[in-house]
Image (cartoon, coloured by chain):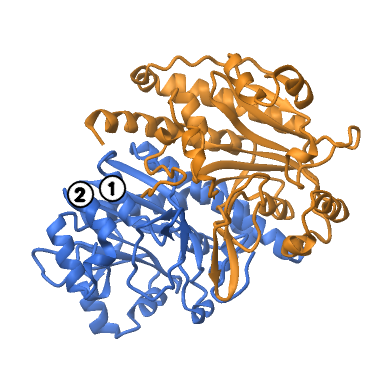
Chain colours: A blue, B orange
């Protein structure tokens, strides 16, 4: 790295460290417990987009490297009512995604879950967290923002929202990026169709075929910030949803075994720390938000 | 889990969350930056004891799951002067170690490094952190300590210390456990022989054959708490040390390539969060300090 690049990286890392501090502090104020991440497990998020599974044989059993901790979050609800975890995720994305400026094959997300919560509770919590982060960065990282030439406004709560259907009708297939470029503040995308997401997001009983879930989209073209929502927590519903996705129960047998007595109902989300850092710092590419970025298809330390 | 086990686990997780908070806060007060962990890399700690390497092919290159972030810490010193990271480590330990009560094949360590620091600086920092953790747990987790029936005293600074040679002469091969059972407060083990440790711990120029490093041993039989020390930071010295260990340079070629212009001199350590939690809570086994414990040889979620 050149001296200039090193100086910029140092500035970005200082801001990222402050982002982590504020998120953890705000959650602790609300009585969340911080959990340790899970890296290897026989069960992990299957995801709804093509990633190559990263698996390792441990003592004769196949373990996956965590793609997201969603299943472990459901299990943890049997012990804790609210918790968060800074969770490293490995997702071996298709190589073409190296060009998006938004994909790393290893990243950290702040993943959280709340027992008995509704989607709207998770949305309000997220808004509060984001506003607190931006306010603290303004206050505690004034010099750093100036060094990066970043002007960052504090979004007004509640954030605007749009349904998936409306977004698709108005802006077509590429609505996410169009919305992101149009907006001056983060915007919620809600009511995503069940075909577009994983089986574990809860189907809306009042609106079959659509989910009680949400994405947050950053403004200024920074794209998707997070996904979250309510979860399917009943054993029978979970099995139905797996089958409706055309997946087989055998593939999820370890998870289904654990789901047998149902999970507690819950809602939560996971927000990528590198993408959040990119937005806060106004960086061109997500790899600028990591000291050891993992760029799909490249050899990375 | 029975209701009783769930209640105990909740208590332990609350204390662990507080331990994480205090460690991070104390380090931030001292102007440390928090970094994101690294999970996959072509380079990782070779360790000085037998673990099976956990490797994954990513885009045609072999990546190891992090055994410790030591090499990345040396690299990070080119950007930052002091930093810490809650770093998940995977170490596929021999199956027999499931019985020790001290080994998990996945755990989190608080790993930190300070540019231009000496071993003694790292030792004092560690003592300050541990004393702060214990004081905060006394203050903020009074009920939880009572629930666990744990009486925890605040160790006096500076902690006592003993050289490896003296410990070996006095107590024989099993000195670590003997010392741990004898002591009422944590004790430093220093000046470990180079044959007993990895090549990256710095050889003492004033005492050849011995390292400028240290282990901390918990009292009451809880065993080893952490390892740390000064590092070999010069390219030529690193090469010599690899060769003197009977290892070959080819195995470390990615790391050596990065070491070519030397690293900054530094000292640091890594302290296991589950073992620290076990000591603070007075738990019989380390697996009681994790919601999803990874026990060598067992199938674990």
Closer to us: A77 or A60:
A60
- Residue B21 visible? The answer is no
Label 1's element?
helix
Image quarter for residue A294? bottom right
* Of the image marks 2 and 1, the number of the one nearer the N terminus: 1
Q: Is A53 left, or right, of A297 in this rendering?
A: left
The residue shown at (38%, 44%) is B292
Residue A4: give x, y in percent of width and height: 73, 64
The picture places residue A123, in percent across and down from the top left corner, at 28, 56
Residue B29: x, y in percent? 60, 35
Q: Is residue B56 above or below residue B178?
A: below
Locate the N terminus of chain B and report the quarter of the image it occupies. Answer: top left
Residue closest to the eye, A10 or B279: B279
Q: Secondary structure at mark 2?
A: loop
Which residue: 72% across, 51% down?
A: B74
Give the chain letter at badge 2.
A
Q: Chain of mark 1?
A: A
Please, is residue B245 above or below residue B273 in the view? below
Q: Which residue is the site of mark 2?
A: A263
State yes or no: discs 2 and 1 in contact (Cβ < 8 Å). Answer: yes
Q: Going by the picture, which residue comes out furthest to the bottom?
A: A172
Residue behind mark 1: A75
Q: Residues within 10 Å of mark 1 (few under 14, many from 20)?
A: many
Give the side of residue A236 with respect to residue A114, left or right. left
Name the one closer to the observer, B10 or B172: B172
Position above or below: A185 against B172:
below
- Gap between marks 2 and 1, in whole Å? 7 Å
Among all residues in the image, which is located at the extreme left? A206
Q: Whole-percent x and y of residue B157? A: 66, 17
């Amino acid at each position: 790295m050149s001296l200039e690049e090193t100086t910029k990286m140092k500035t970005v890392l200082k801001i990222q460290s402050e982002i982590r501090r504020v998120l953890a502090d705000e959650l602790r104020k609300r009585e969340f417990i911080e959990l340790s991440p899970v890296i290897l497990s026989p069960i992990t998020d299957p995801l709804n987009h093509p990633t190559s599974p990263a698996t390792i044989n441990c003592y004769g059993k196949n373990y996956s490297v965590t793609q997201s901790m969603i299943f472990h979050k459901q299990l943890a609800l049997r012990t804790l009512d609210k918790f968060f975890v800074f969770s490293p995720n490995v997702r071996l994305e298709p190589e073409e995604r190296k060009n998006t400026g938004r994909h790393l094959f290893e990243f950290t997300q702040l993943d959280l879950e709340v027992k008995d919560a509704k989607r709207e509770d998770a949305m309000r919590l997220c808004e509060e967290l984001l506003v607190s982060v931006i306010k603290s960065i303004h206050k505690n990282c004034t010099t750093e923002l100036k060094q990066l030439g970043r002007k960052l406004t504090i979004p007004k709560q509640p954030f605007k929202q749009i349904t998936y259907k409306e977004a698709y009708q108005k802006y077509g297939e590429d609505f996410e990026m169009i919305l992101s470029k149009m907006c001056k503040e983060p915007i919620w995308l809600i009511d995503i169709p069940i075909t577009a997401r994983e089986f574990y997001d809860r189907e809306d009983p009042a609106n079959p075929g659509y989910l009680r879930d949400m994405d947050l989209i950053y403004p200024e073209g920074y794209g998707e910030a997070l996904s979250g929502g309510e979860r399917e927590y009943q054993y029978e519903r979970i099995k139905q949803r797996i089958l409706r996705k055309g997946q087989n129960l055998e593939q999820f047998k370890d998870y289904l075994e654990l789901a047998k007595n149902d999970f507690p109902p819950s809602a939560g989300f996971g927000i990528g720390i590198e993408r959040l850092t990119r937005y806060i710092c106004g960086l061109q590419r997500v790899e600028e938000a990591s000291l050891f970025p993992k760029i799909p298809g490249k050899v990375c330390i």
